[in-house]
Amino acid sequence: MQMFDLSLIWAVIIAVGVIMYVLMDGFDLGLGILFPFAPDEDARDVMMNSVAPVWDGNETWLILGGAGLIGAFPLVYTILLPALYLGVFLMLAGLIFRGVAFEFRFKSHRSKRYWSLSFAGGSFLAAFAQGCVVGAYIQGFETANGVYVGGALDWLTPFTILTGFGLVVGYALLGATWLVLKSEGHVRDWARALVPKLLLGVLAVFAIVSLWTPWIDRGVFERWFDHLQVIWLLPAGALLCALGIFLCNRHGREGGAFLLTLGLFVCTYLGLIVSRWPYVVPPQITLWDAASAPESQFFLLIGVLFVLPIVLVYTAWSYWVFRGKVRVGEGYH
């Protein structure tokens, strides 16, 4: 008899990996999105230097979530990869572009402008593709006998385009609050002025998606309005975080604004999970339907129990070592 529900344990691990990636890679993607609008080249240098020591490590969580998914829930890969192939390809292409541009921009002189554009374009593409994937997950997938039977572009709809742009604005907000925390002088003032505008954009998308979703899937509407009213604490928490971001930014509480932006993302993410629970491939396939054999899940779990503490320790250590403000003129790393 199985003592623990390994599928549930793996669902929690993967969910944590995904939200850690969104939070930690979100602010450096957000900086890339804001890159073309920076007031000058000094501001761009500060933006890149503020994430230079940590941006590679942030993407560890994406690998953890992806590898865990294919090992613990292989049916999800069987369905989602054909359904989202182009979207995932665009996301990875964007991450590759920005990664290469990140390094080459510091080495170049005459071509620095083009690497800056590559960094901004890759960041926007990766964020937009991730938002479209989230929208496609909300829409659900057309399956038959555990196989995706929809078209290659079914993931690209007006709704997913909206969620794509919504995540772009959300990451930009996260990047702006991070930059306020890590910079000073005219760079900080510029980022602080952006925060209320970006926050308004995030709330607008949040409202439109909330009104649109019931027309896409009646089940989501019933989940929110027919029972489990306690889940309304999540959007209430998101709105409180939004109010706190505005007030903290207005009164110069830099750390508070950034942490509350993280809280806004967490509340929204939990609301998405609750809306679709326990379906990992909406609208029919649950996490238990998609799970691999218990022996496989247990074997993988042993490895993760060793690796996860190491990842947490070196992540915390790197952020601690490189804490504090980044000033104009300071070098790479």
Image (spheres, helix red, strand yellow):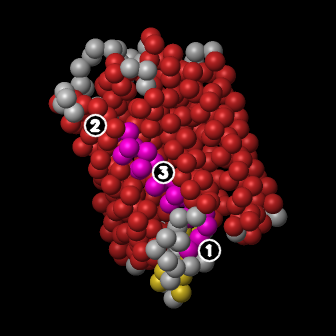
Q: Residue at x 52, y 79 (%)?
A: 150
Q: CA distance from mark 1 to mark 3?
A: 23 Å
Give, as a three-letter code, the residue at label 1. Pro
Q: Earlier in the sequence, mark 2 or mark 1?
A: 2
Give the SS element for disc 1.
Answer: loop
Please say whether residue 161 is visible from this viewpoint. yes
Q: Which residue is under mark 3?
A: 128
Q: Which residue is under mark 2?
A: 114
Give, as a three-letter code, the residue at label 2. Tyr
Q: Is residue 168 left or right of residue 58?
A: right
- Where residue 326 appears, x then y in whole percent? 35, 18
- Where residue 108 appears, x then y in whole percent? 18, 31
Q: CA distance from mark 2 to mark 1?
A: 43 Å
Residue placed most toward the observer, 37 or 333? 37
Residue placed most toward the observer, 321 or 119? 119
Is the C terminus in the top left, top right, bottom left or bottom right quadrant?
top left
